[in-house]
Image (cartoon, rainbow, N blue to C red):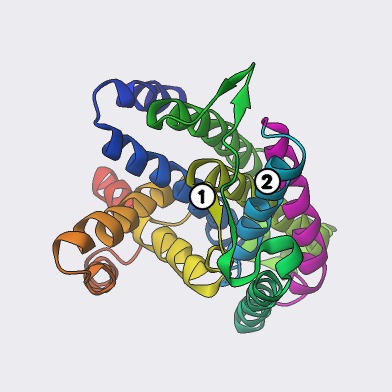
Amino acid sequence: MIAGPSLVLAAAPLYLAPYATTTLTRILIFGLLAASLDLLVGVVGLPSLGHAAFFGVGAYAAAWTAGHSTASPMALVVAVLAAAVVSLVAGSVAVRSSGVFFLMLTLAVGELMQQAADSWASVTGGSNGLYGVPAPSLWGHVVDQPATTYWYVLTFFVLGMVVLRLASTSSPGMVLRGVRDSEIRMRALGYPTTRVKLGAFVVAGAVAGLAGGLLAAQQRLVTPADVGFTTSALALLAVVIGGTGSWWGPCLGAALVIVIRDMLGASIDGHGPLALGLMFVLVVYLMPAGIARFRARRNVS
């Protein structure tokens, strides 16, 4: 399921202009963030408004590591570990709730992380962020061109998607879906539902951290906005538009969000958010289960 599209994506820079390649790189990064959020929303049934907290932690961790130690892929390892630790701490509290309470707790986590990024200037650069992040280096070669950066991001995008795919379709994934459908029943069957949800929360946070590390490598800049509510809301919007519970739906939603906000918005005098809102209304009205689920229903009928 992943190999075919990956081969097509791998050949994209050979036919695209540098700007289009850079845009596609941003789509891959944001798509990985949206897909990690869908593990919570579509598989476990836990909608989050603070998922960008782990995305931002990964970005800051990778940027700081690249600037002070090494610009190799080890910076991504640090990003994943940092995001996993933060998600473990936050999830230990958040997964004990559900519904609106879970939503508000994750929102609070996101706001706390944004405030920390904004005020801890000695580490995060404060409101200016961390800029001039060194480009990744592989075997002595600096990855700083649009095509090479794209392939670097694509490699780890595929790795992250494989992890999410395994987490959602393996035996633990079936347990997660059972918790989503009826947590009380799963608890009665003897499953430790709190630990199960915490495990999913940590996996989703770790993959979001990987996406954040890729953002630092591609953008070479990390700011508190990358941790904030707007990023979380856009990721959730991508999941809803693309369709929950589908491995490619959130990626499609992420592509639409990036294209409408960044490319179409520039051509209509900066009204990208307005166009994005109109698209969201149309999708919810015409395809309430998202684009991926709409296609699935049409195939069945």
The residue sitting at 24% across, 54% down in the picture is 263
Q: Nearer the viewer, mark 2 or mark 1?
A: 2
Q: Secondary structure at mark 2?
A: helix
Residue 62 bears which disc, if any? 2
Residue 47 x/y as whole percent: 56, 69
Residue in the image at 73% along x and 38% along y: 77
Q: Secondary structure at mark 1?
A: helix
The quarter of the displayed image where residue 55 is located: bottom right
- Residue sitting at x 75%, y 43%: 68
User: Is 25 above or below relative to 294?
Assistant: above
Q: Is residue 216 magenta?
A: no
**Amino acid beneath label 1:** Ala
234 is higher (above) or lower (below) than 143: below
Residue 297 higher or lower than 182, as above or below: above
Magenta region = 72-97
Residue 35, label in figure:
1
x and y, in percent, of residue 224 in the image: 58, 68
In the image, taking residue 141 as reference, residue 179 lies left or right, namely: right
Residues packed near mark 2 inside 10 Å, few (<14), some (14 to 19) or many (20 plus)? many
